[in-house]
Amino acid sequence: MKHPVNYTLEKKEKHTGARLGKLETPNGTYETPMFMPVGTQATVKAMTPEELKAMGAGIILSNTYHLWLRPGSELIEEAGGLHEFMNWDQGILTDSGGFQVFSLADTREIKENGVHFKSHLDGSAQFLSPEKSIQIQNELGADVIMSFDECPPFNESYDYMKQSVARTTRWAERGLEAHENWDTQGLFGIVQGGGYKDLRIQHARDLRSMDFSGYSIGGLSVGETHQEMYEVLEYTTPELPEDKTRYLMGVGTPAALIESVIRGVDIFDCVLPTRIARNGTTMTSKGRLKVKNATYKKDWRPIDENCDCYTCRNYSRAYVRHLFNTDEILGVRLTSIHNLRFLTHLMEQIREAIRNDNLLDFKEAFFEEYGYNEPNARTF
Amino acid sequence: MKHPVNYTLEKKEKHTGARLGKLETPNGTYETPMFMPVGTQATVKAMTPEELKAMGAGIILSNTYHLWLRPGSELIEEAGGLHEFMNWDQGILTDSGGFQVFSLADTREIKENGVHFKSHLDGSAQFLSPEKSIQIQNELGADVIMSFDECPPFNESYDYMKQSVARTTRWAERGLEAHENWDTQGLFGIVQGGGYKDLRIQHARDLRSMDFSGYSIGGLSVGETHQEMYEVLEYTTPELPEDKTRYLMGVGTPAALIESVIRGVDIFDCVLPTRIARNGTTMTSKGRLKVKNATYKKDWRPIDENCDCYTCRNYSRAYVRHLFNTDEILGVRLTSIHNLRFLTHLMEQIREAIRNDNLLDFKEAFFEEYGYNEPNARTF
């Protein structure tokens, strides 16, 4: 079958095998490795589409669960789809809703057919199934959509995880059946299995045997250590096809992005850059900088002297700090722009390092400057 | 004396005498009548400078009282002044702080020397005088600054108002003495006098005899009716020099802007467009539209079909309504852009009508379409 979403592997880095590639979608072709900003409710928080494009953002992610409950996927379909609704003419990826059902909903009951739960908004009874998730995502019309999965805690028991993964495989088959827009939307399968090597490998092989447009790695960045996550990647990515995209869901710290690319991942998403931005915290080439702190009251330097973003080209730390101190919306806008550009720029640097076969040197230098090599370094 | 801020009267409208002119400042020359967006805390709420320029904003206003208390005028002077601090290279006007001392501060004691009051932020004891207000404004470095005034309630007794106005005249003389930047900052006097015709006229004449760069009309838009305000303008503006700018402080409803231009006013400021925007209320050519209302859930039209703003060119009412429904910052950004553009566009239309000597016809048509002619019409 011809897929609407395709991946082309262009080069593997000499020392690590990290992949440089191109992800082709109905709304543009994007260089990978790539970081995708998160627009949970059909808006990347505080940003316009033009601002995202100016910082080199490619595909953005939006959340099936949230949009289904509010404003409703039928309404968005009536608007002409998510691209039209939110004025975004580049790629969009929607998740399956599975993660939110397991992390946000108030109560849930998992059956073979699907999941009964109560909405976190109004407590209303809801039901999400593989077919329903695909139907919602068909209505939303993103370029890349996800198969409905169960996302159990990383430390769930082996027995539970084994039967959960088997069910997610059956759900994947049902999702493939249910998908109606094979000409315009690429469907990805999601590999689960927690920290159990044999389950991860088995699940990857099972999903690989189906005709997905790409593969996601789920159930990570949910509380396990970075080291545990890297180990999962090390035995999982070799099981995935070389000619399909590998998407690590929910990852966005600078260290984890670099380490995961080294372990064969192509694309990422995370709320981290916009979430910490709203709290006045920024990522810089020299590590975290909490610009709202009083320390920066008279600091006339930009947030990051090595950054080319709109914020750093035009405003001082002192001004941004003043905006946070006075609860001004522009403060959140400026830190959000900076943090998102920091990650899109990091991905540009990673791609360049793959091209030059010096990714490990880049990592070493980046970690040193960011402060990751210091004792008790913060993870972001 | 050569003033750094000058006004050139270019034309008077044939039927009303409404003035078309140019206001020259050290940071640009602007066509009048003009509406000035308010940037209380060195930011027009939710906007960047580029967005303000794109909608045709000229001069913006910032508040002396707020900036003095936080982050401090000395800090802004150290930054290189307000323009540099907030990245705004067009004109800035600062008010005197008088209005805020009388409307925001917790307790106050007015003496000949100045006003003792408690900060609304932390209750700390503060003192503002004509000299102090000018010193702060000299440190902030706006293009147009204001003489320190007392702003009594509109219905204050005649006897109190009479002695208050006399004191504001003495404060005006002290402000002229204190002003240090005659080459870069134009100082305006503020006419007070409530609704007492003889006091307004006397105060206008007293201030006119001093060498101010322009004249403000204060103590209006503080609770009196529109009709009362228009009457004050009718007997006050004829007392002001034709070759200086007339600035009506705190006015920004569409009706009041048109009526006040007809009565000889050149420039205006008001928080209204950005304040109601944050509450999901917009001004359109067909009147007020509360876009956050459920009515607009599936309304695919722009907020105003006759508007050329970024919001109306790119987003539906349904999308903006969704953003408000989900508390997304982009919602406030989009309504703020729209409302500010609505007023800058209204001023363009007013200038065009003066040029064409059909301001009354324009008013009639605008009022009819906006809904002002309907019974119990809202004033904004």
Image: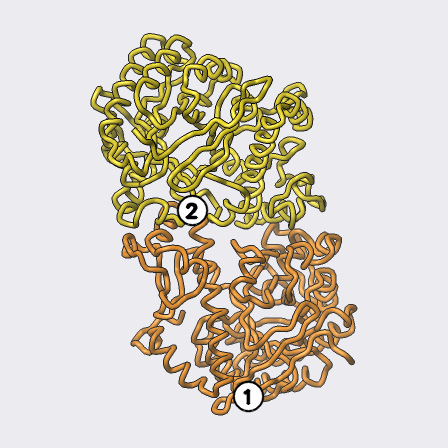
Chain colours: A yellow, B orange
Residue closest to the eye, B97 or B288: B288
Q: Earlier in the sequence, mark 2 or mark 1?
A: 1
Residue B103 lies, in percent from the top left, at 55, 63
Quarter of the N terminus of chain B within the rendering: bottom right
Residue closest to the eye, A65 or A171: A171
Residue closest to the eye, B314 or A151: B314
Quarter of the C terminus of chain B within the rendering: bottom left
At label 2, the amino acid type is Glu
Above or below A356: residue B228: below
- Tell me which chain the residue with mark 1 is part of: B
Residue B284 lies, in percent from the top left, at 38, 67
Residue B292 is drawn in which quadrant? bottom left
Q: In this rendering, would B253 be left or right of A97? A: right
Residue B2 lies, in percent from the top left, at 77, 79
In the rendered image, is residue A22 in sight? Answer: yes
At label 1, the amino acid type is Lys
- Tell me which chain the residue with mark 2 is part of: B
Above or below A361: residue A304: below
Above or below B189: residue B74: above
Q: In this rendering, would A310 be left or right of A34? A: right
Query: Label 1 belongs to which residue?
Result: B12
Q: In this rendering, would B256 be left or right of A83? A: right
Query: Label 2 belongs to which residue?
Result: B328
Residue occupying the point 53% across, 83% down: B233
In the rendered image, is residue B145 in sight? Answer: no
Residue B236 lies, in percent from the top left, at 57, 85
Secondary structure beneath label 2: loop
